[in-house]
Structures are given as C-alpha cells and as structure tokens.
Image (cartoon, rainbow, N blue to C red):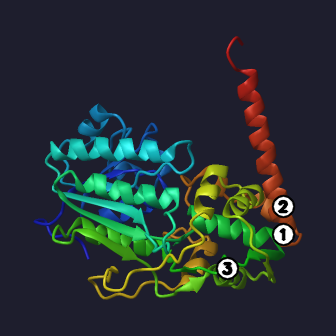
Amino acid sequence: MTAREDTARTVLVLGATGYVGSRLVPALLAAGHDVVASSSRPPEPAAYEWGTSVEWRRCDATDVGQVERALEGVDALCYLVHSLDGPRFADRDRLAARTTAEAVSRSGVSRVVYLSGLVPDPGGRALSEHIASRHEVESLLASSGRSTLALRAGVVIGAGSTSFEIVRQLATLLVVQPVPSWMHSKVQPVAVSDVARALVEAVGDDDVTGSLDVGGPDVLRYPDLLASFSRCAGLLRLRLPVPAAPSTAVGLGMAALSAAPPRTALALAHSLRDDMVCRPGHTWVPADGEPLLDAETAIRRALSGDPGVPESARHGDAVWTRRQPLVEAVPSPASMRAASLLALRRAREASGQARRLWAGPGR
C-alpha cells in the first residue's frame, strides 16, 4: 500500500547506509514517501539500487551544524544511529542523540522514530551497557518535544545483521557448539523485512508514542536458535552444555571465532543472560493484518541469496559479514570452509594493521 498524497512525507533516514537503513529506504520509497538518505560517510549512490531515487546529505549526528542541515525541509526522522563497535560507544551515542534532539526541537520535524533494543527485566541486575545506552537514547530523543516512538527489536534475522551473522558464523564453524549453562534465556527474533515494515508504519502514525516491541511469532532459547540455523543450512551440529562461563569470556570466544568486531561481540554477550522477548500489551501488531515471518522462514530467506528479499545480503553490508564465493565454493566440509574464511579475514586484518603502522607518523 502506498501513502496517499496527503500522508506522504519527506523522511530523513539517519544511518541510511547501515544494515537496517539500507533495507528501510526502499520500503519508504515503495510506500510513497520522499527520502533523504544520510550517513557519516561520503555518499555512494552507485552502491545501492535505490541510490539515485533519494536525496543524499552527509551527516555526523554529533555535529549540530550537519544535523541541522540534514533536517532542512524534513517532516519525519528515522534515527538508526548506533556505535557498538567503537570505544566509549555509550558516550558517543549519548552525544549524538542529544545533538539530534536539540536540532529536531528547532526544526519542522513532527515525527521521530528510533530503532532501539528490547529492554529485559534483569531481575535486579544492572542492564548491559549496550541495552542501557539504547534506553537512554530513547529518552533523549523524546526530549525533542516531537511525537516520538521507539521500536524495540532483539535479534534481527537477515544476512548482514550483526546478531544473525554471529550466529551464522559460529554455527557453521563449530561442529560441537559449547553452550554455557546460563545461556538458555529466551529470544524473540524478527525478520529484517518486518522491522522495516514496522518503521514505515510508525513514520505515518504520529498518535503512537513511547515504545513498542517488535518480534516475530517464535520465542526460542539461544540453543534452539542455533539449532534452527543448522537445520535451515543443512548442517549436522551438536550442542554441548558446559559449566558456567563468565559472559566476558563468552564474548571473547564469540569475537575469536567469528569476524565480528571484538567490542561488538562483547557488548552483545553481556545481553545473553536476560530474556529478550516482547512485552505483552506493548508489542507492535501490523496495521495491514499481514503475519510476521517465522524464524525459520526468515533464516531460509537470508541463506537463499535472492536479491528480491530484504533478508538477502547487500553490497553495502559491513565488510566482516560478506560472503566469499571463491572460498565457499571449495569442495570441503562447511566447518573447514568457515575456518578458511576466518583465517583469511584475520590475515587481511593483520596486513591492514601492519600497513597502518608502517604509514604512521614520520613516514
């Protein structure tokens, strides 16, 4: 369904070249909205199939001048800014959210939509740093005084998604998968196409504010999610319970055995102790009545390579998530191909670090 002329908006997508943003922009265009695509990197329209259908504005969300220029002539803002892979990411996200909220309060923007993370009940324990940061950003954006909605999602399924890629890489590499005794929390994964659908719907409905959770129809435990992936990928894998291990050790293991940035893996590992499921009565229900994708359907779409579905890989996805067809075409067990790909990535990282050191000050 496309937006009517009287409901179509000019929507700024901050973080348009990121994983969700690159899937959201075409969904907004299909709904009849005009899109201003923005990210902190120089624009690369040719890298996206929708690149020539939007207006590009470069914007670092921590720079008030750039944010104000990006907001000119905009009716609604989709805020997809996250900094998990950098040091002091919570400080940077706080500054970006505060800067954006203040600029929004001085602009003509009437609607702000933020993709946040599910906030669990930690049972008296402190929230993990990355979940606490997402919650703080929600409050800062709401301080703009505009109609604001935070859509909270947990594991997003799709090739290129950070959480999905970590699951894929670990499940492919490890024939025997150690599962700490505490890592049996519940998770409610959601397909990236449904996340984009929720964001598009939220852009057009100023009356819904506060926060809503976004999750698919399946509630699984983490070992079950690993099993679902293995089933869909045709992999024979064994999950082995192991004694309790600190979440930091688990995060370091995730970083070592996948190509994920270490800080990202650590931040996500600290969230594995809590149930990441939607709150009854505070869960997004599609206005069009169409069902959400179940986990295995979403996984199969992510593995299909079909460019026509949002769950499939895209050229602009993070480098560490990209597949290597030449390596994967080698006739060998999947675990060996995964190990070869990980070794290749590690070699490239080491080579890059060596080049940067060699080209350092004084050379």
Question: Which amino acid, by three-letter code, is at mark 1?
Answer: Ser
For the residues labelled 3 and 2, say whether their Cβ atoms are less than 8 Å apart: no
Res. 132 image quadrant:
bottom left
Disc 3 or 1, which lies upstream in sequence? 3
Q: Residue at the far front: name it.
A: 124
Q: Which residue is mark 2?
A: 339
340 to 295, vertically: above or below: above
Residue 88 can be seen, yes or no: yes
90 to 340, vertically: above or below: above
Q: Which residue is mark 3?
A: 229
Instruction: Please give left or right for residue 297 compared with residue 286 in the image.
Output: right
What separation in Å lies between label 2 and label 1 (alpha carbons)? 6 Å
- Residue at 84% across / 75% down in the picture? 175
Instruction: Where is residue 27? Give x, y as percent.
Output: 35, 66
Instruction: Where is residue 113? Give x, y as percent.
Output: 29, 61
Give the number of marks.
3
Instruction: Please give left or right for residue 140 compared with residue 129 in the image.
Output: left
Q: Which residue is mark 1?
A: 335
Instruction: Where is residue 25? Give x, y as percent.
Output: 37, 59
Label 2: element kind: helix
For the residues labelled 2 and 1, say whether their Cβ atoms are less than 8 Å apart: yes
The crowd level at tag 3 (other Cα within 10 Å; few <14, some 14-19, many 20+) is many
Question: Which amino acid, by three-letter code, is at mark 3?
Answer: Phe
Which quarter of the rendering shows the N terminus? bottom left
What separation in Å lies between label 3 and label 1 (alpha carbons)? 14 Å
Question: Which amino acid, by three-letter code, is at mark 2?
Answer: Ala
- Residue at 17% across / 46% down in the picture? 105
Instruction: Please give left or right for residue 77 compared with residue 25 in the image.
Output: left
Q: Nearer the viewer, residue 32 or 211?
A: 211
